[in-house]
Amino acid sequence: MLALILKERGIIHMKKSFALFLSLFLVFTLASAQAESYLLKLGTSLSDSDPITEGLMEFERIVEEQTQGDLQVEIYPSSQLGADEDLIEQCTMGMGIGLITDSGRLGTYVTEYGILGGPYLMDDYAEALEILDTPEYDQMCEKLTASGLRVLSGNWYAGARHLFMKQAVTKPADLSGLRVRSSGSAIVNASVKALGADPTVCPWSEAYNALQSKVVDGVEVNYAAAVGSSIYEVTSYICKTGHFQHILTLVVSDPWFNTLPAEYQTILMDAAQAAGEVASTGTIEKDADYEQQMVDAGMTIVEVDLDAFKDATSSVYEELGLAQLRDAIYTEIGK
């Protein structure tokens, strides 16, 4: 009889232990699901001292603070995560990857988006913001989404791009026979050619060596990137063409973006807009200092015939089938 009682008590104890284990397991599983974390790796070809990269750091701070660390952001400057083209492809495949890149590269996926990198399309950052507020821009972003690329914000201003050359250039004819580095996008290739030079494609990370080894005679670049990559060491003249107002875009994988809670999606979009403003303000505030730094290092500033360069590049929009879109944008902003 005693043995039977002990046996029954043992069974009851085992049942209670199992029930407790099951309860704890369910609580742990639920807590783990609720505390699920996400990781976004962001790449850029720019140095860690560039105002754009500093803007990315602000983006990281906002996102991690507002998600209480559940969404982690890791930033990889100087192409440490890979070339822009490779990162964009990884985005379309659904990986937790993002990057800050130029419109020309995104134009490979949506041709219309490349217009943002067109010659003399906009006069300054203020006008760029007007363009980003048009229905035409919204339609470009929707097409990128359909291609697997989610635009978080396009308000990352890197400044005007000029020609950094080994010899002085004041008009398109001066570029005849000279090789100028190009990113390889259709809009940049066509623009460099229209400016009067022969576009020579190479990654930005190789631009310094290309100049040093005389593979190219010059590059077209904004001040922050020129300083960050020490381009002033291997060129002699800053020819102030201002042919591009360099607007960059922060994009992530759309399939990855759609795995996030709606709240986190909103945080990412808002943080990107705010951080883009920080980066753009930093660019504008530092450009004069960058120019002086390069002059102090021995660079010579060359004023050019702007009208001649504008006339020379006006055909680019017709050539790439973007003239109608340009006109529609100008109508929207009253230009």
Image (cartoon, grey):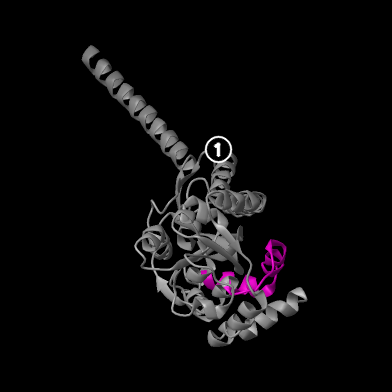
To which quarter of the image does residue 116 belong?
Answer: bottom right
Q: Position of residue 235 (x, y in %)?
A: 47, 60
Q: How many marks?
A: 1
Left or right of 312, for residue 20? left
Left or right of 67, for residue 130? right
The residue located at (67%, 70%) in the rendering is 122
Residue at the extreme right: 334
- Density class for disc 1 (Cα within 10 Å; few <14, some 14-19, many ≥20) is few
Residue labelled with disc 1:
68
Residue at the extreme top: 2
Q: Is residue 136 magenta?
A: yes
Which quadrant would the C terminus be assigned to in this image? bottom right
Q: Nearer the viewer, residue 261 or 170?
A: 170
Q: Position of residue 303 (x, y in %)?
A: 64, 67
The residue located at (44%, 38%) in the rendering is 32
- Residue 232 visible in the displayed image: yes
- Amino acid type shown at disc 1: Gln
**Magenta-drawn segment:** 118-144
With respect to residue 11, does 91 lie above or below?
Answer: below
Q: Magenta residues: mostly which secondary structure?
A: helix
Left or right of 77, for residue 307? right
With respect to residue 232, does 75 lie above or below?
Answer: above
Q: Nearer the viewer, residue 110 or 77?
A: 77
With respect to residue 43, does 325 lie above or below?
Answer: below
